Amino acid sequence: MNKIMAEVDVKSGLRSILQRIDAACQKRNPELRCLTPRLVAVSKTKPIEMIIECYEEGQRHFGENYIQELAEKANNKDILEKCKEIQWHYIGNVQSNKLNKILGIPNLYIIETVDREKIAEALNKSWPKFNENGEKKLNVFIQVNTSGEEAKGGVEPTNVISLAKFVIEQCPNLKFDGLMTIGRFDYNVEDGPNPDFLCLKRCRDEICQHLEIDWKDVKLSMGMSDDFEHAIELGSTNVRVGSSIFGYRPRKV
Ligand SMILES: *Cc1c(COP(=O)(O)O)cnc(C)c1O
């Protein structure tokens, strides 16, 4: 066992996050009680052994944001053998020259970061080549840049309706499943509800109104280790938690 693993008990970390998710659910408005938030365990930079441990404890959804790393992990022999029901979420920027690499990921469940028509169109066109029996649509979330920070990916909130409409109407091989935001770094919850989370919810409501979709059918992917409980109280249905399960993660250089 290597050093990082010896210091972190993944199984108890996972159990504790699941309990905190449950507790946060109890604090929500009654209208949200029908929705159970999904935990995506973000395993970036962490070893295969930790993913397997987490899987053995019952976790199925895992997230990665570097394509090369995701491809290596998803194709790893032990992962393929021991984690047959794993569901991978790609949560990194989608570069147009790497689409085939993403689409070829075994057990790819969703791409959470579609943020422009060109990418949606290209994914729509290529997916049938990777989807052998032709029955499954590729799940996508649209990433929204709710904080207006230039370095962040995501469509501007003012353009989100037209992108959602494009995916729904022009991309028959894609399933528009929700919206995703990363949100500003270091927001202090004591200053009130996080404006990024409120913005994402507003985008969802506008899409649902314009395109006549039930809001319960559009997921909200928001909330990470530091703020997932807050995000759940504001309506998150997909939280992406890394370091609180797998331990501290040095910044990638
Ligand atoms: C790394 C990452 C996370 C998880 O962050 P933690 O703070 O470790 O929970 C969530 N979402 C995205 C897009 C990430 O890149």
Image (cartoon, rainbow, N blue to C red):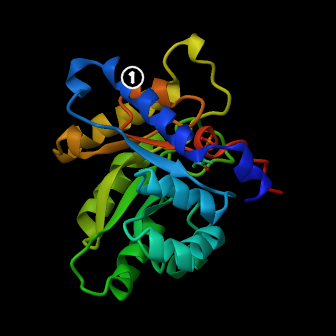
Image height check: is 187 above or below 185?
A: above
Assess disc 1: are there few (<14), some (14-19) or many (≥20) residues with their C-alpha within 10 Å of its C-alpha.
Answer: some
Q: Position of residue 215 (x, y in %)?
A: 22, 38
Evaluate whether residue 95 shows in this view. Answer: yes
Evaluate whether residue 64 shows in this view. Answer: no
Image height check: is 181 above or below 72?
A: above
> What SS does tag 1 mark?
helix
User: Going by the picture, which residue comes out furthest to the right?
Assistant: 253
- Residue situated in front as seen by the camera: 111 or 82: 82
Image height check: is 198 above or below 128?
A: above
Q: Position of residue 179 (x, y in %)?
A: 39, 46
Position of 176 with respect to 73 (left or right) is left
Image height check: is 126 above or below 58?
A: below
Q: Position of residue 160 (x, y in %)?
A: 40, 47
Residue located beneath label 1 in the image: 23
Q: Which quadrant of the structure image shows residue 134?
A: bottom left
Instruction: Classify mark 1 as within 8 Å of ligand 1 or not, answering yes or no.
Output: no
- Please count the marks in the image: 1
Q: Amino acid at mark 1?
A: Ala
Q: Position of residue 170 (x, y in %)?
A: 28, 69
- Residue situated in front as seen by the camera: 152 or 90: 90
Image point (67%, 57%), residue name: 46
Position of the C terminus, as image quadrant, is: bottom right
Assign ligand 1 to one image quadrant.
top right
Image point (61%, 65%), residue name: 48
- Residue situated in front as seen by the camera: 6 or 244: 6
Position of the N terminus, as image quadrant, is: bottom right
Image point (62%, 33%), residue name: 184
